[in-house]
Structures are given as C-alpha cells and as structure tokens.
Image (cartoon, rainbow, N blue to C red):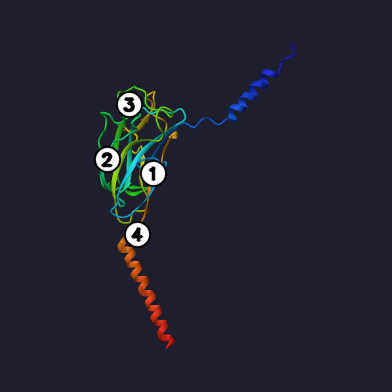
Amino acid sequence: MPYSTKPVLLIAILFIVACLVKPVDAGVIVSVDWDATLANGIQSTIVASPGDTVTATIVFTITGSSSVSNYEISTRFSSSSLLFVSRTDTGPATLPNAPPSTGNTGPVYNIQSTGLIDPIVGLYGVNEFIAGTVPSFGDPGPTATSVPNPFAVSAITFTVRPGANGMVLIPGLFNMPGSLDLIDDNTNSPIPLSELTFDGGSITAVPEPSAIALVTVTLAAFGFSRYRKRNILAV
C-alpha cells in the first residue's frame, strides 16, 4: 500500500502556522502615573517646580491571560529630587472580593536616603508597600477582563526638591531574592520576571522664580550695556 503524504503535509502546515502565529501577550505592567484620575491614561511625566507637592499613583495593567492574586512591590525614588511625605493604599472600587490591601497594608519604609546608588535615579530613598488583591490566600484575584485596566494599588506623595529633573521614581521587585517581593497569579505562583514590566515616573523641572528673575535681570543689564555702548560709539 503506497504511503500517503497528506497527513505529513497537514502536520507540517499546522506546525508552520503555529510557529508564525504570535502568542497573546500576557503579563503585568507596573507603572507610575501622576494623574490620579487615570482619565487620560497613564501620565508618567509631570512638570513641577521646587516645593510642589506631587502624588505618584502606582498602577497595574493586566494583559492577556494573566491574573494577580497578591503582590508586594518596592519603590525607589531619587533622594535628591523628592522628599517622601506619605503613602496610602488605594485600588479600584469594582475589584472582586475586596479592595486591595484589606487587612494587609504592610510596612512603609520612608528612608529619605539610603546612601546607595541606583543606575536610574542615582542616590535613592525607599518606600516599600504591600497590598493583597484578595481577602484570603487562594482566592481568585483580578484578570485582564474582570477589572478596569489600569487600576491603582498605591499612592505616594512627595515634595519636589530643587533641581529635580529626569527619572525620579521607579517601582520594582528590589528585595529579591530572599524576601517577600513578588507578584503571584491566581495559581499562587510567582509571575516570571519575563512577564513583568516596570515603568518609572519622571519630572520635567520648571525654573524657580528666583532663577527666572536672575536671568531676566542679567539679560536686561546686558541689553542696556550694549545699548549704552552703541550710543557712545555713535557720538
């Protein structure tokens, strides 16, 4: 009986199609948003002046088939750019089971300067927070379709220091390994780092009024000097 090539050809076609089809992106994106309403999406950059009070909202965006059952996140902030003021745990009112952090607010470490250097924010202070998205271990947490995305998990308030500019705040799993920093899915398994994305928040500095005044006076003096010199040469 002659051997049929049809099954082999069919398998080959299915294999090629499977290789070419891009899998659905799955994971969790942790971002810094300076617009607490999230009405305009995630605003990761803010214009600020020294002395301004700003609030960074840490938000999660769940993508694909991912889920989140509990988490602990740490943040690093530029100690030369920001002065820690306070922190609250907040989350979406529509979250199933219970709001985040119910009975599990965790410690906050508002060390203004650790004396350590981060490659992104330079000398940094730390603010660690923990919040469980479900009331009890093992309960199902939010998925990409069960809650509005993105949703807030924490809000951290700072005072802007003079000279603040560039990337000033980054979330991450900085206390790994050997600590509780993690994001678990609904199987209570840590989500692989390859499926986690951490986006920081930056500040665009506005010159201090005194600096603007100094520049104005300097330019005016320079203009007057040139005007006076021109008049003298014209005589």
Q: Is residue 146 above or below residue 154?
A: above
Residue position marked by numbered label 4 in the rendering: 207
- How many C-alpha atoms fall within 10 Å of the one at disc 3: few (<14), some, or many (≥20)? many
Residue 119 placed where, x, y %? Answer: 38, 48
- In percent of the image, x 40 and y 35: which residue is there? 150
Spatial CA distance of label 2 from label 3 is 20 Å
Against 2, is 94 above or below? below
Label 3: which residue? Answer: 134
Is there a contact, CB below 8 Å, between mark 3 and mark 1?
no
Dot 2 amino acid type: Arg
Rendered-image quadrant of the N terminus: top right
Q: Nearer the viewer, residue 91 or 164?
A: 91
- Name the residue located 31 percent from the left edge and 29 percent from the top edge: 99
The disc at residue 87 is 2
Instruction: Determine if residue 119 is in view.
Output: no
Disc 3/disc 4 C-alpha distance (Å): 44 Å
Location of mark 1 (residue): 200
Mark 1 and mark 4 lie on one chain; the one further toward the N terminus is 1
Give the Cα separation between the discs numbered 1 and 2: 17 Å
Kindly state the secondary structure of the residue where label 4 is placed: loop
Callouts 1 and 2 close, C-beta under 8 Å: no
Instruction: Locate residue 176, reporting x and y percent.
Output: 34, 35
